[in-house]
Amino acid sequence: MRLLRRTLPLLAAMSGGALAIHLFAFGVEATDTDLDYQRQFNERYRIFSLTLPDKLSFCDEAVPLTKIDVRERLDRELLVNTYWQSNSVLAHKRAARWFPVIEPILAREGVPDDLKYIALIESGLTNVVSPAGATGFWQFMKETGIHHGLEVNAEVDERYNVVKSTEAACKYLKESKAKYGSWALAAASYNLGPAGLEKQIGRQKVNDYFSLLLPEETSRYVFRVLAMKAIITDPERFGFHLREKDLYAPYRTRSVSVTGPVEDLADFAMRQGTDYKTLKLLNPWLRDITLTNAKGKVYEVLLPAEGFDKPADTDE
């Protein structure tokens, strides 16, 4: 405790008084006894359970909250994502950047807006690669991506292209909705795969997501979507207080059409007034330093526009 008493004033001074040091969220009195220390913990530290809604829908399909396991599965995901604060804060920040890109595509393709949260729970809206090789915001496997119209090779991998992969995800989800009859089952198919889902539907003789016994990840899947939707749309209810300027603004970009080969993308970036790092930040689907483009395909390449590095809330 002597070390703690010496260290806290130093940390506060380093921040010019702006850093508030809180132990157990509210501060702690100086004490050398375990009994007092435990008393302060019990008096000051609080974790609350969450209230569940009376009604809920997924893509305008009613969620049967009268079922005990449905309520408890929802409760689990709300608790996990409320108290995994760093993950949910980052999700909220990234959603502000990427949902404005994804939402118009879903609307154009006739896919419910709720399904944008699939990209959020699949990847955290980052271009991650799973141990199995699923890639990008929508976590497409290579074969599935190609089947749904994505170009995937050593130089171009459109699983990393937010627009192209969102369009491919819409195709997948609409096909699944037509096959299984509900968006909840379409989402389950997205996670489990059609073969796995059809096996369980045939075995259990039930065609309802909320009545099927599914592998744990798939059983949690729709509820994770519902939980993240609740937190993103009403953050203060769950204890998240983010200001507009805390969110990640959409990138300010311009687009150029590339119809031929590019021998060196670093040189290309410099000719366009930027650098290779920024080019790759905006176009992660470019996977090599060259773009052969032997077939003369038209690629839309994003480049930084005026004010690209400017914070969203900076006054003019």
Image (cartoon, helix red, strand yellow):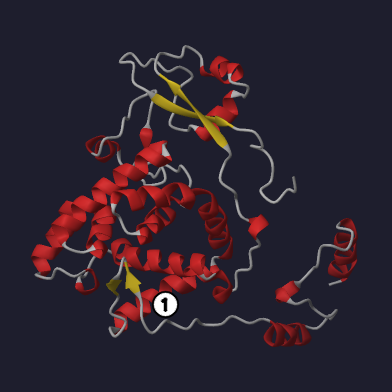
Quadrant, the C terminus: top right
Residue 259: give x, y in percent of width and height: 39, 17
Q: Is residue 193 visible?
A: no
184 relative position to 101: left or right:
left
| Residue position marked by numbered label 1 in the rendering | 75
Residue 308: give x, y in percent of width and height: 64, 37
5 relative position to 219: left or right:
right
Identify the image quadrant of residue 140.
top left
- Residue located 61% across and 55% down the image: 247
Q: How many marks?
A: 1
Residue 112: give x, y in percent of width and height: 32, 59
Q: Nearer the viewer, residue 310 or 138?
A: 310
- Residue located 32% across and 43% down the image: 167
Amino acid type for the residue under numbered disc 1: Asp
Residue 134: give x, y in percent of width and height: 35, 43
Q: Nearer the viewer, residue 314 or 238?
A: 314
- Single out the residue that lies furthest toward the front: 316
Q: Is residue 258 visible?
A: yes
Quadrant, the N terminus: bottom right
Q: Residues within 10 Å of mark 1 (few under 14, many from 20)?
A: some
- Residue located 24% across and 58% down the image: 186
- Residue located 88% across and 70% down the image: 5
Q: Indicate the secondary structure of the residue bearing disc 1.
A: helix
Identify the image quadrant of residue 39.
bottom right
Q: Nearer the viewer, residue 200 or 308?
A: 308
Identify the image quadrant of residue 16.
bottom right
127 relative position to 251: left or right:
left
Compared to residue 45, the image places residue 286 above or below, namely above
296 relative position to 27: left or right:
left
Compared to residue 4, the image places residue 118 above or below, namely above
